[in-house]
Image (tube, rainbow, N blue to C red):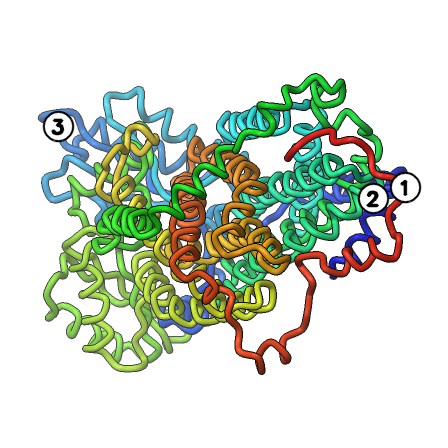
Amino acid sequence: MATFLYKLGRTAFRRRRLVALLWVALLALAGVGAATAPAATSSSFSIPGTEAQRAFDLLEERFPGAGADGATARIVFKAPDGGKMTDAAPKAVVEETVAALKSGSDQIVSVADPYTAQAVSRDGSTAYVSVAYEVNAMELTDETREALKQAGHAAQGKGLTVELGGDALQTMPETGAGEIVGVVVAGIVLVLTFGSLVAAGLPLLTAIIGVGIGVSTITALANVLDLGSTTSTLAMMIGLAVGIDYALFIVSRYRSELADGRGKEEAAGRAAGTAGSAVVFAGLTVVIALVGLAVVNIPMLTKMGFAAAGTVVIAVLIALTLIPALLGFAGDKVVGRKQRKGTEDPEKAAKPNAGTRWARFVIRRPLFVLLAGVIGLGAIAIPAASLEMGLPDDGVKPVSATERRAYDLLSDGFGPGFNGPLLVVVDGDRATADRTVATIKGLDGIAAVTPATPNKAGDAAMITVIPKDRPSSGATETLVHDIRDATGDEVLVTGATAMNIDFSQKMNDALVPYLALVVGLAFVLLTVVFRSILVPLKAALGFLLSVVAALGAVVAVFQWGWLGSLFGVEQTGPIMSMMPIFMVGVVFGLAMDYEVFLVTRMREAYVHGERPGEAIVTGFRHSARVVTAAAVIMIAVFSGFIGMTDQMIKMIGFGLAVAVLFDAFVVRMAIVPAVLALLGHKAWWLPKWLDRALPNVDVEGEGLAAHDADGGTDGPRKPDLVKA
């Protein structure tokens, strides 16, 4: 592989104008496709194989035109102190609002008058108008949303407290300035790392090009593939981070080759052949982790994973082709001015760098470093034992949001369970439905049960059940299971609350198979790369420690509220159901990036004759600074998404940033060298039969050494320019 990538790098360097033109053309083509493609009209959410989904499908079949998957809204009214919603003045305001809603949009299926739909609280203080739409929230027109808001605003100035809730208000997540700050921080780190604006600008430029192609392609295909609004956000998050990192490693190795006296074209080829090999395998681990999300069998998660994996593939291809091409354009400007002029202090350059000093410290005290790292991460992981999972609803939104205030008004007026009604679908006649109602009324935890509503054919019915407790409580989850256990196979429970419960259960059930698949495939891949059994095993165990610690931090901030205000968390609540499995997928791929980049240099030194301890120091001397910069950049990029208003994106950004912090600086920089120092030669042991069976991918570039012997360099070596 190293020889092939070496030739690819040299070719891209020589044909740099053609390579650059091809990538610019791809960017323009993707941009045109995104600009001309129809807007995505759907962002459906389904959970195949669950009872909630079967009930949902039955509703669509037996109640056609009822908008089973349509958006809903509630306008909640609260009378002033001492008044009631049944008084003449408030009642007139509500009736005006109902009339305005009915005439405000042709996407409305129904508007329920609270005085005929029994939607007035027992004490008369609160009432609500329910609105049902024929399309889902993403398909609502701006005019429809504006009509809903106008109806609410018109009622607000008439002495009543009026708030709006429901998924009809759902819009695309607003982006903050955090993403830009993340890119700016990445630029500063690159300048400090390279001492050259040109060298710092190359990874940023190529990462932006790669993300531009990836996100534009997703936008162009969003309508066809039914991609959700968070798909492109995830792709941008992952693509930007790995795009900068992969380019960073290629540029760094190029500068190192120049410092060894290589000519520019030869240095570009060798950078692609050595660091490029690590980029390929690091990218493969990320792709495996993201594509493996398909194991969960939730279409939305599968699409997110495939889309993000596509941006990673683009980032790898750009690092192997566009970076060498741009290095050809950059010339000597890729190194700092002092190095170009030869004015750098030779005594300063000869001193051991921070990576060397740290590696020597770890080698002297490996057991202390290992215990400190494991105990520290173990302590941070403790909150993960209290993990409560669910999908975010209006109850976790900040109190400044009208949806949250509507949620609270409904809880105060009708009970906490009113925000999470259960929809029971009966596949049978009216007698079966009536028996089901009677059975449900006999269960604990019920606040109210509505009479059965049959369909026109009389072969199905709907029943609404109001739990006593809030939607995300354990009591409500128990009630869902009790209804399912007490009724027959012809009775199915669905609704947002039941969907959340089934979704969480599906996530839990898929976690172990997913871990086995992803970690197993990556273990095989790393065994091929490092030709060792213990190194991949150590990498996997270290990852598990860092991801559990990251989950502990997420629980502490988003569920317990520790330091919540610092991260913009105004309301605590359960952790998003997909968070554990999603973090496992994404963080595993990213963690293996640092494992490959750092340990490959150690392996390279070891196979060239250095002792295990010396190889650790050599790996850190060459790679620690660059891996540190890459980790800081990735943390900065992910942290930028903490500033988004969407709770899910905020949580993902925080979780990934913390996970990279733990994995890069505690696991890879401390625990990994400590374990390798304790193992010594045993770390690189591989059974002879397995050594013969595994393919030789030549990540260390041994084939390039043979290439040197054949006179493959492009001219005499030049004086040292820069030390990486």
Calculate the distance from the C-alpha at mark 2 to the C-alpha at mark 1: 9 Å
Nearer to me, 69 or 308:
308
Q: What amino acid does circle 2 point to?
A: Glu
**Label 2 with label 3: CB-CB less than 8 Å:** no
Who's the residue at 64% across and 57% down the image?
608
Secondary structure of the residue carrying tag 3 is loop
Q: Where does residue 382 sit, x and y in percent of width and height?
A: 22, 51
Secondary structure of the residue carrying tag 1 is loop
Residue at which label 2 appears: 266
Q: Between tags 2 and 3, which lies in front?
A: 2
Who's the residue at 49% across and 70% down the image?
533
**Label 3 with label 1: CB-CB less than 8 Å:** no
Q: Between tags 3 and 1, which lies in front?
A: 1
Q: What amino acid does circle 1 point to?
A: Gly
Nearer to me, 548 or 488:
548
Residue at which label 3 appears: 83
Residue 304 visible: no
Who's the residue at 22% across and 70% down the image?
481
**Label 2 with label 1: CB-CB less than 8 Å:** yes
Residue at which label 1 appears: 715
Calculate the distance from the C-alpha at mark 2 to the C-alpha at mark 3: 84 Å
Q: Residues within 10 Å of mark 3 (few under 14, many from 20)?
A: some
Left or right: residue 619 compared with residue 263: left
Left or right: residue 607 compared with residue 296: right
Secondary structure of the residue carrying tag 2 is helix
Q: Where does residue 721 sit, x and y in percent of width and height?
A: 74, 29
Q: Where does residue 169 sit, x and y in percent of width and height?
A: 43, 39
